[in-house]
Image (cartoon, rainbow, N blue to C red):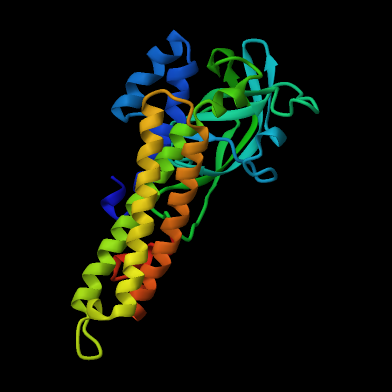
Amino acid sequence: MARCRSGGVAFSVLVHTDMSSPWLTRFGNDAQKRKYLPPIITGEVVCVLGITEPGTGSDMANLTTRAVRNGDHYLLTGSKIFITNGVYGDLYFVAARTGPGTAERRHDGISMFLVERGLSGFTVSRKLDKMGMRASDTAELAFHDCPVPAENLLGVEGRGFQQLASGLQRERIMAGVLALSGATQALEDTMAYIRERHAFDGPLSQKQALRHRVADMATEIEAARCLLYRAAALYNDGKDCITEVSMAKLFATEVANRVAYQAVQLHGGYGYMREFPVSASSAT
């Protein structure tokens, strides 16, 4: 899917399949699974993960969004930003503080909630205008005394951070997959271009200096592929692989940036023109 030439499409699907709904399969109760999983699987319900906040970024220990128990529901108040699928989503997995943390355990007191679109007090404040990933909608969300049913608490109250942290390896692997795929496609596009483009009495693909740069790009991509495949194999076997997955994700995303830059440079002026797909790689 990442090879459809739109990183935003792949990323939007990734958020639905790998960054939000898995929390329901891991920590949801039977009633929650019966209610939400069927439409999630068929795609009738689009999932959203709501963690990042305007003042705290992704530092969950400093979340300011609060959920206060009031009878058979929680009153949710706060805001979220940079939320993928936030504009057109249907089911929001929202992190909020339900209790205080401590100096030693700053991440305690955070809970996860299943918040349905249409609840009173819940609004999409604005659709954000981005430089890249434009096919993926990104939103700012606002909650003001939004009544979330108590049965929509996901997992254990106060253990939201620990629940989220348990699934980060899957997300990191998928991020590495998207980066590796994009880098591979950028290299393929570049090789096709320099074979066709003629300058200085021959195709650019015959110029030694450019061949060296392509070889460097291909080498980095292959190294990223090996790291990523090893991390995926360890994860698939259920082994402890936090270090390997983190290394693979870091290296693959850094390689994608370097390859995108080189790909644009090797296209010359055309690398900046929207008629060539590689122009989008530098913004994505």
Instruction: Residue at 43%, 57% (x, y): give it.
Output: 255
Q: Is residue 110 left or right of residue 182?
A: right
Q: Is residue 244 visible?
A: yes
Q: Quadrant of the C terminus?
A: bottom left
Instruction: Residue at 41%, 55% (x, y): give it.
Output: 134
Q: Position of residue 164 (x, y in %)?
A: 55, 27
Q: Is residue 65 above or below residue 273?
A: above
Total numbered badges shown on the rendered structure: 0
Q: Is residue 144 above or below residue 202?
A: above
| Camera-nearest residue between 167 and 29 | 167
Quarter of the view holding residue 211: bottom left
Q: Position of residue 113 (x, y in %)?
A: 56, 23
Q: Residue furthest bottom?
A: 201
Q: Is residue 5 left or right of residue 118?
A: left
Instruction: Residue at 50%, 48% (x, y): give it.
Output: 250
| Camera-nearest residue between 228 and 60 | 228
| Camera-nearest residue between 22 and 198 | 198
Q: Position of residue 57 (x, y in %)?
A: 64, 44
